[in-house]
Amino acid sequence: MYIDTHAHLYYDDLKNQLDSVIKRATEASVNQIICVGTDLVSSRTSISIAEKYKGVFATAGVHPHDAKDAPDDYLDILKDLLTHPKVVAVGEMGLDYFRNLSPPECQNDIFRSQLKLA
């Protein structure tokens, strides 16, 4: 048995063929998949996908690239999302000072608050 610990099943090239993707994964002995959210929308979508498939689980979080777009109440929303029984982790989160798609201080604040929440 294998677990795919980091998948984005909501990406355009996968979302319209999820049944086939899950079937092929199962045939390759991948019995569990963790669909990773990168912002609040994709976190909700990950949960939605996890609800439809027995071996799929979700995460909820804000990626450093998306930190600048997080609403003021993002932590309250994340807290709520994290109560879902198919959510297994906080994330995707971290710091990315190479691309700097969000200002470093914003990334740092969002990352630290998610660490405390976790």
Image: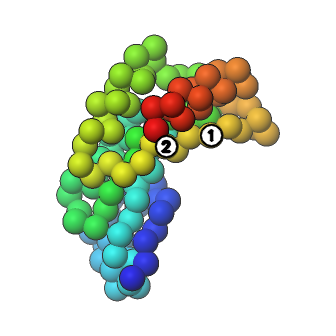
Give the amino acid at mark 2.
Gly
The dot on residue 106 is none
Indicate the position of residue 67 as horizontal and vertical percent values: 57, 27
Q: Check the image and report above or below for 114 versus 17.
A: above
**Left or right of 1, for residue 5:** right
The N terminus - image quarter: bottom left
Question: Looking at the image, do the residues carrying marks 2 and 1 touch, with CB atoms under 8 Å apart?
Answer: yes
Tell me the residue that label 1 is attached to.
94
> What residue is drawn where x is 66% and y is 27%?
108
**Left or right of 66, for residue 5:** left
**Residues under labels 2 and 1: Cα distance?**
8 Å
Indicate the position of residue 98 as horizontal and vertical percent values: 79, 39
Q: Check the image and report above or below for 68 versus 21.
A: above
Tell me the residue that label 2 is attached to.
91
> What residue is drawn where x is 40% and y is 59%?
34
Q: Check the image and report above or below for 94 versus 18.
A: above
Q: Is residue 56 visible?
A: yes
Q: Check the image and report above or below for 13 versus 97.
A: below
